[in-house]
Image (cartoon, rainbow, N blue to C red):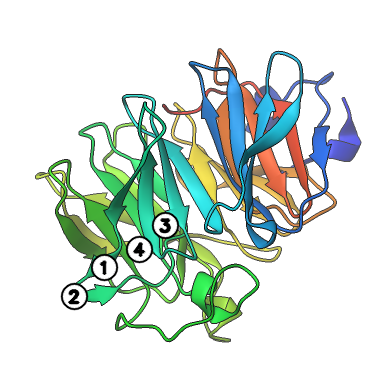
Amino acid sequence: MAAIDYDIRDERFVKLIHGNANVEVLWRGGRWTEGPAYLPAGRYLVWSDIPNDRVLRWDENDGHVSVFEQPCRNQNGHAVDRQGRLIACEHRSRCVSRYEFDGTRTVLADSFGGRRLNSPNDVVVKSDGSIWFTDPSYGIDSDYEGDAAPMEQDGRHVYRIDPAGGLTRVIDDMKQPNGLAFSPDEGFLYVADTGRTHFADCAPKIRRYAVAPDGRSLGAGADFVTCDAGLFDGFRADTAGRIWSSAGDGVHCFAPDGTLLGKILIDEAVSNVCFGGPKRNRLFITATTTLRSVYVNARGCT
């Protein structure tokens, strides 16, 4: 086993990694890479290089990397909806948008209560077609990842876009909501809080919220896990309910009960991950300046 790539904390993690599967560097050259999303119809991955204001595209067939869009309004997180369309969080435009099949762009949400959103950060699509996204302030804090501007909302929150287009606020008790993902049965929504970047007393954690029977609202949240290396940012769930999360020293894998099973060690801070490939068993990792991947013995949720 390539021990240099793994930190095993629980024997269950041994069954989730392959002894001959090393972490591969697929591309170098970013400033802060983020928002990986795999599009199975084309067998390619897109991801953001936020300060460089570009979205890049990696072709799974031949490994070729090209520019998908530049400028891209400082896009951050991405998701793929049930029709195969790309959903994007845009810092500079302070909106969530969608790429249509004909190549046009549709703005799905850019304001709440008559005031502009902060800077949508990460996004997930539920099986009913609703779109859930976080709205911290990173894209308006400076000109590095967007445009510096005053915050118009009363805080940093989490929102839901109804399939019909309506926007509701679903979480308002976080400091800087960031990455998010549903459990496999969509009974819980997990959300990372990176508030320590702005509030010294905010623990770096992932919180868990029960989804109400109506499927549109959430119950009270509870802390799920706390990060022991830097901050949690983006993450994904696998089909067994495990959470694979970015962190300061790599990717942390947690059991559904919150037990840290192990880490995939990376020599840069990791911002986000996603599962892809024909079997959804390839974990793609955006790590500061690089795009990386590793095959694991788990399958990501669709």
| Three-letter code, disc 1 | Ser
Callout 1–callout 2 Cβ contact below 8 Å: yes
Work out how far the residue at label 3 is from the one at label 4, CA to CA, in angstroms. Answer: 10 Å
Q: Under tag 2, what secondary structure? A: loop
Could you tell me which quadrant the N terminus lies in? top right
Residue at the spot of label 4: 222
Dot in front, 3 or 2: 2
Residue at the spot of label 3: 191
Q: Nearer the viewer, residue 139 or 6?
A: 139
Q: Earlier in the sequence, mark 1 or mark 4?
A: 1
Work out how far the residue at label 1 is from the one at label 4, CA to CA, in angstroms. Answer: 28 Å
Residue at the spot of label 2: 114
Work out how far the residue at label 3 is from the one at label 2, CA to CA, in angstroms. Answer: 25 Å
- The residue at the point 26 percent across, 31 percent down is 127
Is 170 placed left or right of 86 in the picture?
Answer: left
| Three-letter code, disc 4 | Ala
Q: Position of residue 28 (x, y in %)?
A: 83, 43
Work out how far the residue at label 2 is from the one at label 4, CA to CA, in angstroms. Answer: 30 Å
